[in-house]
Amino acid sequence: MGVDKSRTNIILFFYTAWARKYKESIMGSVPTSVDERVTLLKKLQSPYYRGLNDDQLRIIAEPARLLEVHAGEFLYHQGEPANYSYLLVNGLVKIIHHHPSGRPIIVRFIKPGIAFRIAYFGVVSQYCVSAQAATEVRALRWHMHDAMRLLQAFPSVAFNSLAVLQQMLVDLIETLNWFTCGSAEERLFWAVRRLAEGLCEGDRALLPVTQHELATSTGLSLYTVNRILKSWEQRGMVERHRHALIVWPARLASVGATRL
């Protein structure tokens, strides 16, 4: 009983510290004016708007609207018309792809400063994934008519966006390599490592995922995921909780050291 209580206290402390970090550095008061939205964009230091001055940021911020979404709620669902583009202001968003079998696969976590509008383009553009708030979330939202107009007005934003997409493509190729050639442990290692990127607080990262979600995202059985995580926990690499996983990336790196 004492061990369980201690672990619960650790995860609550770690999550509170993580949430406080973003609240103090990003959230502030609720934006109600263009100037406040410009301030948010400047604080975020998003790679999309690198090199823009205040006047240019003001033009970009003018048509944006701020959304507040509670943990567990969806910003959009796979298959819906892709009418909006989003930029995460604070919190954490879980990007989920639903396999034709109905199995949900966690593709990645979106961190503050990153845009998310993953969609098919055609006669009718549709979201090809779902976006769910993993924590309390605030995001700026643009209608796609405004977003496309801004991309035409500011070619540098389009260029910066291509650089972000290029890195995503590299990540996709690496993921395909690990999932095609890796063992069960290596596949789980890669999935956990990718999800933990950018979430470190000190030497550890908190992943708001369950073992079932890791199993469906890697194509492994729940039994296999549980067995591997138990082994990692005994070696001090992770700490399991009911709805989260605490990861020590530096310690976990030894699992994939032979392939990195």
Image (tube, rainbow, N blue to C red):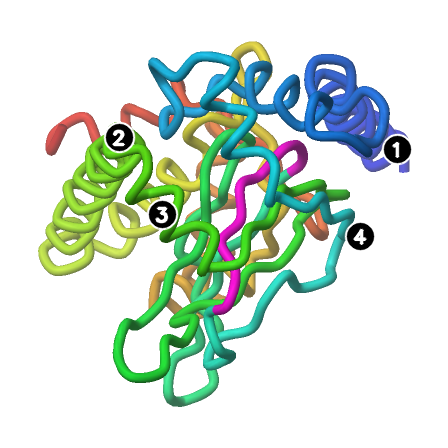
Disc ID at residue 5: 1
Question: Of marks 1 and 3, which one's residue comes earlier in the chain?
Answer: 1
Name the foreground residue: 20 vs 104: 20
Q: Nearer the viewer, mark 2 or mark 4?
A: 2
Q: Quadrant of residue 129?
A: bottom left
Amino acid type at image mark 4: His
Report which residue position mark 4 lands on.
70
Horizontal and vertical percent position of residue 52: 39, 17
Amino acid type at image mark 1: Lys
Relative height, residue 225 to residue 171 (above, below): below
Horizontal and vertical percent position of residue 231: 45, 41
- The image quadrant where one finds the N terminus is top right
Q: Is residue 234 visible from the viewing direction of this image?
A: no
Residue visible at 66% across and 64% down in the picture = 74
Report which residue position mark 2 lands on.
160
Q: Dot 2: within a 10 Å radius of its alpha carbon, few (fewer than 14), some, or many (20 or more) residues? A: some
Q: Is residue 65 left or right of residue 112?
A: right
Residue visible at 14% across and 28% down in the picture = 260
Q: CA distance from mark 2 to mark 3?
A: 26 Å
Amino acid type at image mark 3: Ala
Magenta span of residues: 83-91
